[in-house]
Amino acid sequence: MTHVTRIRRRPWEELNPWENSTLNPSVKPVASVGCGEVVEVETWDAFGGAVKPGQTRQQALERGIKVPSNPVTGPIFIEGAEPGDTLVVEILDIELPERGATTISPGFGGLEGWLNLMTPKTKISEIKDGAVHYVTDKGTTVKVDVDPFIGTIGVSPRSEAINTLTPGTHGGNMDCSDVRPGNRLMLPVYQRGALFGLGDVHAVQGDGEVCGSAIEVPAVVRLRFEVLRGKAIAWPRVESDAEIMTVCSARPLEDAARLAYRELTRWMVEDYGWERDDAYMFLSIAAKARIAQIVDPLYTAVAKLPKKYLKR
Amino acid sequence: MTHVTRIRRRPWEELNPWENSTLNPSVKPVASVGCGEVVEVETWDAFGGAVKPGQTRQQALERGIKVPSNPVTGPIFIEGAEPGDTLVVEILDIELPERGATTISPGFGGLEGWLNLMTPKTKISEIKDGAVHYVTDKGTTVKVDVDPFIGTIGVSPRSEAINTLTPGTHGGNMDCSDVRPGNRLMLPVYQRGALFGLGDVHAVQGDGEVCGSAIEVPAVVRLRFEVLRGKAIAWPRVESDAEIMTVCSARPLEDAARLAYRELTRWMVEDYGWERDDAYMFLSIAAKARIAQIVDPLYTAVAKLPKKYLKR
Amino acid sequence: MTHVTRIRRRPWEELNPWENSTLNPSVKPVASVGCGEVVEVETWDAFGGAVKPGQTRQQALERGIKVPSNPVTGPIFIEGAEPGDTLVVEILDIELPERGATTISPGFGGLEGWLNLMTPKTKISEIKDGAVHYVTDKGTTVKVDVDPFIGTIGVSPRSEAINTLTPGTHGGNMDCSDVRPGNRLMLPVYQRGALFGLGDVHAVQGDGEVCGSAIEVPAVVRLRFEVLRGKAIAWPRVESDAEIMTVCSARPLEDAARLAYRELTRWMVEDYGWERDDAYMFLSIAAKARIAQIVDPLYTAVAKLPKKYLKR
Amino acid sequence: MTHVTRIRRRPWEELNPWENSTLNPSVKPVASVGCGEVVEVETWDAFGGAVKPGQTRQQALERGIKVPSNPVTGPIFIEGAEPGDTLVVEILDIELPERGATTISPGFGGLEGWLNLMTPKTKISEIKDGAVHYVTDKGTTVKVDVDPFIGTIGVSPRSEAINTLTPGTHGGNMDCSDVRPGNRLMLPVYQRGALFGLGDVHAVQGDGEVCGSAIEVPAVVRLRFEVLRGKAIAWPRVESDAEIMTVCSARPLEDAARLAYRELTRWMVEDYGWERDDAYMFLSIAAKARIAQIVDPLYTAVAKLPKKYLKR
């Protein structure tokens, strides 16, 4: 077996909102990684590890634990990445822990204001035998197969420090379950070295992440990087064996969807030789679309096209 | 073989915007159907048959053909349906013709204003061997498997005449590909006899129906009706062997999604005994969501939950 | 004094949702009026008169009173109006009663879901000496000058029956305080005779009508009609001595604003000879904009330009 | 006359996107100012001075001039301001130059996608005798009275570096014409010293700033600061002699309006002793609302209540 670089997560007592809860061009990289290398990254869950069995997030906070929200491990300097390039992140594997947390917090979530009188709620689910064991309030165990992915993953913006709760052209908190092992995520590069960061792994998530959290876990993620020199993209893209996908974030949600369809049209034109309006028309017949999340400051939609319809 | 009632479509020269392009409590039923009976309904395509091979919609219109948009066959009186009931429509089968039309019209469509300089475009695709044969502008034929469904299907509103281009609580132009053979659509009943109508079959459609049309076809649809007496629902629901689904329409699209998730929560509570906030949390882990369309006056989202997670 | 036609409102026990709570091409006119004639119309308040002093709407409903929402007096047939024309409604005067009602209803209103735990609330305010006497929960009387206008006013749509709660290109429930005495409202004509209706007068209203109701009153409105033959407009317009205004409705609210600015641009081009992009640029320097309401099924924005900047 | 501190703007060749085009906690203050002191601040226009008579922005850019967008002068350290306080900025006076620039840029602006085929356009207007002299494309001069205000004004966010094009709870690019001489702007303080910055003065602007720019000018602004210790506010507020106002930014625009109405409700409760639901109801009768802008990454709405209705 070849050598694998391991990037450890910072002890959570040392987490810092400016350095760990933003993607930010002014923060010093924690590691430098070459293209083609396999890297193992330890990530925090969205609560920075504060929610433990037998203890709600509320209780953690009451004990005086300051939890930066949605911390990322990084920035990681990717050797050879320059502004105007595309960073390709190959997701090789995600190692899950034995349990994950789900919370409802009043004032947050997709149905906030649509369901009345919600009280905060925390649920810890065991993860074993490839499934999340969700125990309902009535005591029934419902098994949901794990389908792990990276919720927050991105690069440093051009000249902003963007909160890790927010998705955008730079990636960030897209909560898109297609960013999963076996797939390749493409991100625009704005800074020398890209200044890449990630966290917020979900063992499994429903489309929309409607209550505001999924099965939130710390994890160990194996990645490999590649840089497409001089290839600029406007928004994150994902490629699986079977599909090309664009991942765009905006409010309202239809704007996220429009951006995603437009990017997909452009991809078909640039890389597969379609006429633009023909591509647009064909998407109306053959595209798939997923609502990734409707709970973050911007909402995320994914548009997809099966590769079987495309020839280079 | 048992007797099957056939409801013919009106010759398109006789189509009338008030009677055929709205769902409308004041229109006299064209047929009366009993529960359990198999009914065969002839439907018009969204263009009322005006777009023919070798002729664009534009040309049809220039020849003085007045085409009511998106005409429905109906109203069909469902015996025994009363306000406050739920109408169940079992979709048995859809018979497709040999070709279907797709159009781009400036001033209409999901990327209107997002892609510049669009010109109108009409494409006729052959349907054979279970696939749509889409010929690209460069002359390549791309085969897309048919996946037919009913684009516009609904009942008369309580006291409005709603254009058949608009979806709502009464159904209408939902353009939801889950309204397909094998599935059961549930609709709220507002009028005695429900006053049901349908049209706008698509041989196949991409999620979002982004250019504003799919593979638009006239068709013959086989249906069977059932009435759930005294069971009231707020929005259309769909049930397949594997999933329960809610289909809601609003602007912006996130409101359609919120409505769909809220209805799904309510369904889990009413029929499957979940606690409300527990249902909400579980959807955040296990729901699926589809963007049905972002081109009609209201946008449509579908939220789904696999039945394997549910026990009555 | 010349003869004035008086159009009486229907006793509210006889109000009918299909005839009085929609603008609807299938309803028989209640009166026919010539251009230039002064007409006096009795209108209902939004609650159809059901809310009385010492009685909440809730109580009215509990007593079995069926109240069609937001009833209009009409349809009034305007002699000489043909599809494609513009109907000009000169608002001469509004006669107010001695009190008006304001209500909060859970499940309705601009901050529904944004303020928690709201309970229904009805307040009756006296109207005297040109002011509404609003008595706060703490017993203080706050006087607000009356500024009466017609909340719901419009014509029959082309081939729909649109609920009187909804605004649109046909007018309807715009809740726009610029539709006041001294101003001229212009509406597109879709039906022979226009089939005009009105109701829902407000003694005064805040921009946005944020809680969902204003000072709701039955009233007597004096109007005079004019028809601009062959002049077609796309959305309602208002003209005062000092300003031209466009009134557009959509969701989200920015779309209503965009429509209103675009219509204003078109008006400057058509009637005042501006270059389109120059008009657009000038509005960015000199337009005013009002949020009319954010509580109805579509939201309404008004864009205005002082006439002092315009020369025919 | 007392001593007045003058804070000079950085030469535009030295402007830096990270330091001048974000509000950012990591940037070293350029000056420190005590409460009660009169301060004179030189500000850049939104184009950093690059657009000059006889030269479009396009041409400036073609000559290799790198223009950070919407640069601010700052950060200014306000002595005594601590996180959790409110910073009060009294706007004493704005000194205008002799001309201002307005531009249309394809891909930007409120009617982008709603008007087709726009070409870029730059207009320089003279400012004299208290009016902007706008020359139409047809050569007519239209005089618009100046009504200067500060378009971009804010403090450093808690732990983000937010682009100066974006408005938010921290202030920023609100483009709200109520931030004018004679009025007091209140901002939440997130950082020690507040780290205040400003720029983007407009000689006059239409509501909505619909084409994306107003009469853009560099200026000299006279201010005085005050700190309300231990008084925390959630969003910017403005007070004039006659009105209290809340300024909130979001997408869609109705969310900005809802936030503004909710903040106004809270203000009435906290400082003027109203019951919450009574305040909500009263705003529905007496509030005013302005669309500040619909062109920046978030849209801005202002809700207002005349002080004559309020007693402390």
Image (cartoon, coloured by chain):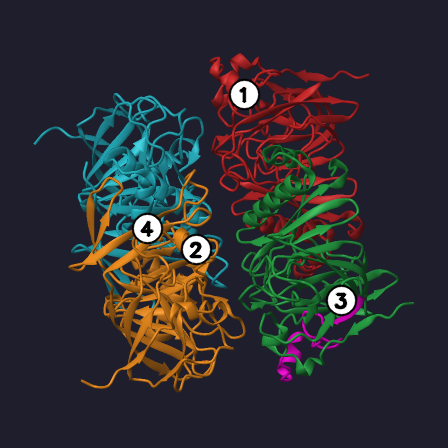
Chain colours: A red, B green, C orange, D cyan
- Find the magenta span and give its range: B38-66
Q: Report how far apart the C-alphas of labels 3 and 4 lie in the structure.
A: 50 Å
Along the horizontal axis of the image, is A230 left or right of B53? left
Q: Nearer the viewer, mark 4 or mark 1?
A: 4
Q: Are marks 1 and 2 in contact (CB under 8 Å)?
A: no
Q: Which residue is mark 1?
A: A57
Q: Which residue is mark 4?
A: D284
Q: Are marks 2 and 3 on the same chain?
A: no
Q: Amino acid at mark 4?
A: Ser
Q: Are marks 2 and 4 in contact (CB under 8 Å)?
A: no
Report the chain holding disc 3: B
Q: Are marks 2 and 4 on the same chain?
A: no
Q: Position of residue C237 (x, y in %)?
A: 36, 69
Which image quadrant: the C terminus of chain D?
top left
Q: Residues within 10 Å of mark 2 (few under 14, many from 20)?
A: few
Q: Report how far apart the C-alphas of labels 3 and 1 lie in the structure.
A: 56 Å
